[in-house]
Image: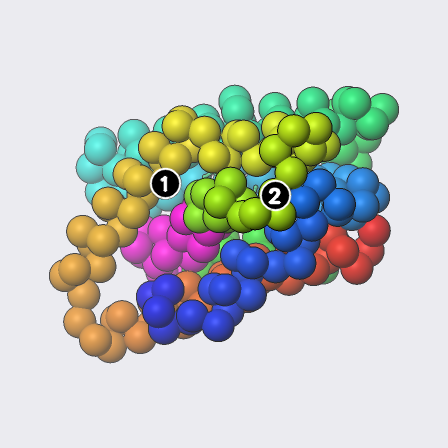
Amino acid sequence: MKARSAPDWQAYCEHRFVRDLAAGTLPEPAFQHYLKQDYLFLVQFARAWGLAVYKSRDLSEIRQGLDSLKAIVDVEIGLHVNYCASWGIDEAALAKLTASRATLAYTRYVLDAGMSGDLLDLHVALAPCIIGYGEIAGWILRQPFTKHEGNPYADWIAMYAGDEYQGLVASELEWLNRRLAGVDEQRMDQLSTVFGDATRLEADFWQMGLDLA
Ligand SMILES: Cc1ncc(C[n+]2csc(CCO)c2C)c(N)n1
């Protein structure tokens, strides 16, 4: 699916926002805007994993959805709340933010893919998010222009490059590859469209951070 969406996948993973974040030169207003919207995004993604639990067929799938839901609620949102607290924005203020169009488009796309389809549709809609952030963090660590010491976004990079998150990516890849091995060409076309759509919505999310800052 990555190969079928290669130009969009690269535009997402190597976006200007990602490069500037790696170099530590991303303007703070851009990161702030992105991270505040990402808080709203994560609230909706927690709902998407709740939907994955509902669409599960056995306890192991329920556990997988639950683990991802808990990773968002217990770990990932914590990073956002901490960054925002350091800028003087408390959680009550975050909950009152107005969602941008990019946030609305992406979160509702994923929830709709999951509601109208089955668990595989939902996972494929979520895949660019989970797998992309894993690849992006690894890519950042390998770039010669990456600022490792004193980068204001080091906590963000460390969370997604860390073993806990990379383990989640690996188990998601394993599940997806196993389930996709059994689908026919027509279904693969359908799912690749969902994967490509979600990939482009991810790139739009970075762009929103740059544009609205
Ligand atoms: C726009 C945007 N895309 C991806 C992620 C990463 N992410 C979102 S939920 C989750 C946990 C597993 O579902 C992870 C890693 C993000 N924070 N914001």
Question: Which amino acid type corresponds to the residue marked 1 in the rendered image?
Answer: Val
Q: CA distance from mark 1 to mark 2?
A: 22 Å
* Lateral position of residue 27 relative to residue 58, left or right: right
- Secondary structure found at label 2: loop
Q: Residues within 10 Å of mark 2 (few under 14, many from 20)?
A: some
Residue 81 position by quadrant = top right
Which of the two discs, 1 and 2, sits closer to the camera? 2
User: Residue 149, relative to residue 118: is it above or below?
Assistant: above
Q: Quadrant of the N terminus?
A: bottom left
Segment colored magenta: 114-133
User: Visible in this render: residue 202?
Assistant: yes
Residue 84's spot in the image, x, y percent?
76, 28
The residue beneath circle 1 is 169
Residue 146 disc label: 2
Residue 164's spot in the image, x, y percent?
40, 27
- Residue located 27% across and 51% down the image: 176
Toward the front, the furthest residue is 144
- Residue located 31% across and 75% down the image: 189
Residue 11's spot in the image, x, y percent?
55, 65
Residue nearest the viewer, comparing 26 with 190: 26
Q: Earlier in the sequence, mark 1 or mark 2?
A: 2
Residue 62 position by quadrant = top left
* Lateral position of residue 153 relative to residue 71, left or right: right
User: Residue 185, relative to residue 113: is it above or below?
Assistant: below
Residue nearest the viewer, comparing 152 with 73: 152
- Residue located 31% across and 51% down the image: 119
- Residue located 81% across and 46% down the image: 27
Residue 184 disc label: none
